[in-house]
Image: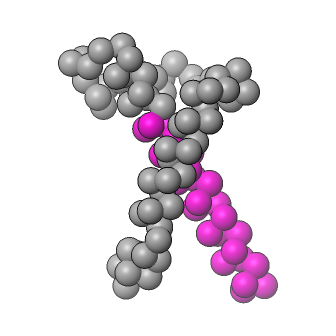
């Protein structure tokens, strides 16, 4: 079964969670850990050289926020599945 049919609110959660995480992160930069330099190189390799510095920063924050929210969602899903089984 397709995951979007089984969990129809998952894409909506990922979008809202990503934007919320990015907003909180951008307003509290000192409260969040810094990513290694290779992560920034990877993200800037994805978006290319045609964006301005401000646009690149927005893309950087949105891409990494999506990754963090996705990892969090996966961990919660695994924990719920393990709790239900055992």
Closest to the observer: 27 or 37? 27
Q: Which residues are magenta?
A: 62-86
Residue in the image at 73% along x and 27% along y: 31
Seen as rendered, the residue at the extreme top is 53
Residue at x-position 47% and y-position 71%: 9
Identified at 49% across, 37% down, the residue is 64
Q: Position of residue 41 (x, y in %)?
A: 41, 21
Magenta portion: prevailing SS class: helix
Answer yes or no: is residue 14 visible: yes
The location of residue 36, given as percent across then percent down, is 57, 23
Image position, residue 49 (x, y; %): 24, 17
Q: Which quadrant of the figure has residue 21?
A: top right
Q: Who is closer to the viewer here, 69 or 85? A: 69
Q: How many numbered tags mark residues here?
A: 0
In magenta segment, residue 5: no
Does 16 appear above or below 54?
below
Quadrant in which the C terminus is drawn = bottom right
Q: Is residue 29 above or below residue 5?
A: above
Would you identify the image quadrant in which residue 53 lies? top left
Horizontal arrangement in the rendering, residue 3 relative to residue 79 (left or right): left
Magenta segment includes 63: yes
Task: Specify whether residue 42 is in view.
Answer: no
């Amino acid at each position: 079964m397709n995951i979007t049919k089984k969990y129809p609110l998952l894409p909506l959660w990922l979008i809202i969670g990503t934007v919320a995480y990015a907003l909180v992160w951008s307003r509290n930069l000192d409260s969040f850990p810094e990513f290694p330099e290779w992560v920034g190189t990877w993200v800037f390799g994805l978006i290319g050289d045609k964006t301005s510095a401000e646009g690149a920063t927005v893309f950087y924050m949105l891409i990494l926020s999506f990754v963090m929210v996705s990892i969090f969602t996966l961990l919660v899903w695994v924990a719920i599945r393990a709790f239900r089984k055992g």
